[in-house]
Amino acid sequence: MSTGADTYGGEPSPMSLDIESREHLDLIADLRDAIAMIEEHLRRTDDLNLHWLETKLPRKAKAGSAEMVMLLLIYREMENRRRR
């Protein structure tokens, strides 16, 4: 019977995971940080450069690719600007 000591907010505690799982969590955290930095950069980018960057990315980027993620972040920023 588990005492709950091996859980962290309903998820397995990072300390109870094996090394490979912790490495995966570290990679996910790094990816999340990188996306946040890109989002911040796009927020500071002027409209002309934002639209230019959009034209340089493939319209039909492979799902899950860096190009697709970047295009989605650009579209999100453009939509946020339209709503302001």
Image: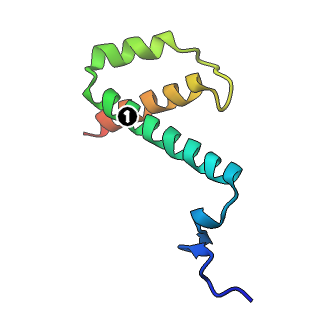
Q: Position of residue 9 (x, y in %)?
A: 53, 73
Kind of element beneath mark 1: helix
Q: Is residue 65 left or right of residue 77?
A: right
- Color theme of the render: rainbow
Of 65 and 48, the residue lying toward us: 65
Q: Which residue does the image show at 70% across and 85% down from the upper left? A: 2
52 up-or-down from 38: above or below: above
Q: Which residue does the image show at 32% across and 34% down from the upper left? A: 40
For the N terminus, which image quadrant? bottom right
For the C terminus, which image quadrant? top left
Q: Dot 1: few (<14), some (14–19), or many (≥20) neighbours within 10 Å?
A: few
Q: Which residue does the image show at 45% across and 17% down from the upper left? A: 54
Of 41 and 25, the residue lying toward us: 25
Q: Which residue does the image show at 37% across and 34% down from the upper left? A: 37
Q: How many marks?
A: 1
Which of the 4 image quadrants contains residue 46? Answer: top left
Q: Is residue 22 left or right of residue 70?
A: right
Q: Amino acid at mark 1?
A: Met
Q: Position of residue 75 (x, y in %)?
A: 45, 30
Which of the 4 image quadrants contains residue 7? Answer: bottom right
71 up-or-down from 54: above or below: below
Q: Which residue is mark 1?
A: 37
Q: Position of residue 11 (x, y in %)?
A: 61, 69
72 up-or-down from 58: above or below: below
